[in-house]
């Protein structure tokens, strides 16, 4: 007998693990329910109510009993025989109302503008959205879950400029990132990632002039609040409220998956590469067994050495005092001819601490440093 739970979502029969929340059951079966405070892998929180659904469960007499109201699918567990609807007119209207409320404090002039794909930061805006309030000047533009959700919901924002601006200054006192609390939707993902996933409590919800935003409990810098600069809070933030400072506005034209070179843990990282072929961001891979979406500050912020323009990318040989690019066979022949004049242990080989374990193992073997060991 299967120990899975059977239910239907929008009429589609699915089977999921017992204890799954409805939203995760939908995700696991490639169905989308809009969400903002939920984050896969973290405990459900139920703050934004963007993920509301209608659900009914069977009763012993064979009829169905509706769950009260419109439950949040991120905090409602599945049950055997449950029937869930995610897109009724009522739900769509409810979500739009919730979103209107949410963005009543968020700059949203660009959010549903038909020109948003064409607009540049210095263009004249036909809606007169000020430069600072445009999505096109936001570092998270086109990586923003809030914007994606508004687009998915096909919102008709008829009052694009009537939001209440918080007028909070940009926080730039920490070494690696900037915080713009005017863009925070108070989903608390960052606070939960810090506490629940990293075991730190460097950031928390604070009150600023009657408004909830994110900060440190004692109002100190992150440096003083015990932050380990892992960047987990940045990685989960759905908006541009917390972003890496370096290459802040750079867009990725390419993604490269790699292994962090800094220590033997082997964290898997997805790197954003810009159009000038520079690594501009490192985002730990959530599926990787070694790190499950986490990294330390070195893996998150310590990869800029890759972009150093003095880095040798091709083999070079000095000819007549000038370094010249050569092919690998030519370079290896050159080194071999020089090594012929030296016996084992009579030369030094310089390797890099940033090379992979495998590279450095091969290098030390080559140099004969393990001559007393069996190989
Ligand atoms: S956070 Fe998203 S919606 Fe807000 S300004 Fe930036 S891109 Fe636009
Ligand atoms: S960088 Fe890590 S430790 Fe620091 S606030 Fe963010 S999640 Fe917490
Ligand atoms: S900073 Fe980002 S993750 Fe944190 S509460 Fe605000 S929007 Fe959510
Ligand atoms: S991110 Fe940190 S823990 Fe992970 S492999 Fe790199 S150095 Fe090691
Ligand atoms: S995603 Fe469910 S309440 Fe926010």
Image (tube, rainbow, N blue to C red):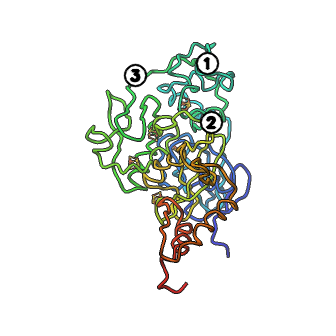
The residue that mark 3 highlights is 167
How far, Cα to Cα, is label 2 from label 3?
A: 24 Å
- Element under disc 1: loop
Residues at discs 2 and 1 in contact (Cβ within 8 Å): no
Q: Is residue 68 visible?
A: no
**Residue 220 lies in what quarter of the image?**
top left
How far, Cα to Cα, is label 3 from label 1?
A: 23 Å
For the point 39% across and 48% down, the residue is 229
Using a 10 Å C-alpha cutoff, classify the residue at mark 1 as few (fewer than 14 neighbours), some (14 to 19) or many (20 or more). Answer: few
The N terminus, quarter of image: bottom right
For the point 46% across and 35% down, the residue is 241
Relative image position of residue 316 (x, y in whole percent): 61, 53
The outermost residue toward the right is: 12
Residues at discs 3 and 1 in contact (Cβ within 8 Å): no
Q: Give the label on residue 158, or none.
A: 1
Between 138 and 78, the one nearer to me in the picture: 138
Q: Vertical placement of 220 versus 130: above or below?
A: below
Relative image position of residue 157 (x, y in whole percent): 61, 22
* Number of numbered markers: 3
Q: Vertical placement of 297 versus 172: above or below?
A: below
């Amino acid at each position: 007998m299967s120990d899975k739970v059977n239910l239907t979502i929008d009429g589609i029969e699915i089977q999921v693990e017992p204890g799954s929340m409805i939203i995760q059951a939908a995700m696991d079966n490639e169905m989308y329910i809009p969400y903002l405070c939920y984050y896969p892998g973290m405990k459900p929180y139920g703050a934004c109510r963007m993920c509301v659904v209608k659900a009914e469960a069977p009763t012993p007499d064979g009829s169905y009993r509706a769950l009260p109201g419109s439950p949040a699918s991120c905090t409602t567990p599945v049950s055997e025989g449950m029937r869930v609807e995610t897109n009724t007119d009522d739900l769509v209207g409810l979500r739009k109302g919730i979103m209107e409320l949410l963005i009543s404090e968020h700059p949203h002039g660009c959010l549903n503008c038909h020109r948003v794909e064409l607009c540049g930061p210095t263009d004249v805006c036909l809606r007169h959205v000020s430069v600072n309030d445009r999505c096109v000047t936001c570092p998270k533009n086109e990586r923003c879950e809030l914007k994606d959700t508004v687009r998915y919901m096909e919102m008709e924002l008829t009052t694009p400029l009537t939001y209440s601006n918080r007028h909070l200054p940009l926080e730039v006192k920490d070494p690696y990132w900037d915080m713009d609390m005017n863009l925070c939707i108070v989903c608390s993902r960052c606070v939960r990632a810090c506490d629940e996933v990293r075991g730190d409590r460097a950031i928390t919800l604070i009150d600023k002039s009657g408004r909830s935003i994110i900060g440190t409990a004692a109002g100190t810098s992150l440096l003083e609040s015990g932050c380990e600069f892992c960047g987990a809070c940045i990685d989960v933030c759905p908006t541009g409220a917390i972003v890496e400072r370096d290459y802040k506005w750079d867009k990725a034209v390419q993604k490269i998956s790699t292994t962090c070179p800094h220590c033997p843990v082997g964290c898997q990282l997805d790197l954003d590469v810009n159009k000038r072929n520079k690594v501009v961001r490192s985002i730990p891979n959530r599926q990787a067994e070694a790190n499950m979406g986490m990294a330390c500050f070195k893996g998150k912020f310590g990869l800029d050495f890759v972009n150093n323009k003095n880095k040798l990318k091709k083999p070079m040989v000095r000819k007549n005092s000038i370094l010249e690019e050569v092919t690998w066979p030519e370079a290896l022949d050159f080194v071999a001819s020089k090594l012929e004049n030296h016996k084992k242990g009579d030369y030094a080989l310089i390797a890099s601490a940033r090379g992979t374990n495998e590279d450095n193992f091969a290098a030390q073997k080559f140099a004969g440093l393990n001559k007393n060991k069996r190989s």
